[in-house]
Amino acid sequence: MSVGFTAACQPADATAAPASRAASSPVGGATPSGTITPGATPVVTAPTTAAPTAEPAETVAAPAAGPDPAQPATPTALAAALLLPVKGRAPLTGYTRAQFGQAWMDADRNGCDQRNDVLGRDLTGVVHKAGTHDCVVLSGVLADPYSGTTIAFTRGQTTSSAVQIDHVVALADAWQKGAQQWDAATRASFANDLANLLAVDGPLNEQKGAGDTATWLPPNNAYRCAYVARQVGVKATYGLWVTQAEQDAMVRVLTTCPEESMPTGSSVLAVAPASTPVVVAAAPAPAVDTLVTVTYANCDAVRAAGAAPIHLGEPGYATALDRDGDGIACE
């Protein structure tokens, strides 16, 4: 998603108990537990042999403000990655794009579909098509996070594919790690969550396919920490699991940036202290999980599988199936 997570990638997407407050020296106004009651004034007893002597009121300083126990600190992406459930990859059996609802629906009901929302969010110098209420993006410039290059986007049959909208956590990957157990509404929400959508370089999006952190990372090293943090955030928010190889890869990347925060909008269901120290021993690259490539002989096969239409960048899309070259196959 939205995983209230906002991102932009595509061939363009864990809480700690606050530290204990330092004990204060016992003084008037202290409670039995030893904590100071803010604003308390100690009582001064007058001598029995003389008239009471006025003494200046003793001021007891209130303890320094500390973290609100009801509002735990946001965990780092590294801490959250270590808390993701680890399981094996489930079969891809039963997966179709249609399982995740209508492609590029207007999930937030702002009058514009998610694809154009992401293009409008991630591109600069955007030009909209007249009469679409600033919805349909005709052109713009993408600072591509995956390649680190700048890409000019122009809407058209032969040019739109230069910039694609990536599901940071691919739909097929999600299907194999918990999404097949969701109801239809949750899958549709996931597929259209802006936190899980990024405008990115088209060819790199196709290269990534349904890869997870263990099998694919952006060539742009400078973006890897943010990219992995976004995957962690999406998976934590939706309760998806990871394979052991995937978690190892996440930890390996995030160990190079231990303070990397969770993306805005992510909601971690299980959290750890933001400062959890992690020591990761050097290890060989984890084994790559086998990914299933979705292909169709023709549009009849696509429709029979309930996957039509297939959009550019989605599993099963092929230019041979997209006769008019508009990025939507088997319409």
Image: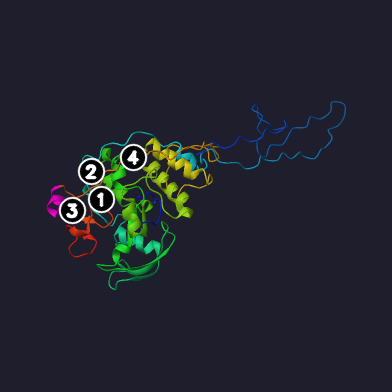
Q: Residues within 10 Å of mark 3 (few under 14, many from 20)?
A: many
Q: Which residue is mark 1?
A: 315
Res. 209 mark:
none
Upstream in sequence: badge 1 or badge 2: 2
Residue at screen point 39% across, 62% down = 121
For this orientation, the residue located farthest to the front is: 284
Give amino acid for label 3.
Answer: Ala
Q: Position of residue 124 (x, y in %)?
A: 41, 67
State the SS at label 3. loop
Q: Residues within 10 Å of mark 1 (few under 14, many from 20)?
A: many
Residue 265 part of the magenta-drawn span: no
* CB within 8 Å, label 1 to label 2: yes
Upstream in sequence: badge 4 or badge 2: 2
Cα separation, mark 3 vs mark 4, equals 27 Å
Give amino acid for label 4.
Answer: Asp
Res. 308 mark:
3
Q: Position of residue 33 (x, y in %)?
A: 64, 27
Give amino acid for label 2.
Answer: Tyr
Q: Residues within 10 Å of mark 2 (few under 14, many from 20)?
A: many
Q: Where 307 sits versus 325, above or below?
A: above
Cα separation, mark 1 vs mark 2, equals 10 Å
Cα separation, mark 4 vs mark 2, equals 18 Å
Count of labels shown? 4
The residue segment tinted magenta is: 296-304
Upstream in sequence: badge 3 or badge 1: 3
Q: Which quadrant, please, contains the C terminus? A: bottom left
Give amino acid for label 1.
Answer: Pro
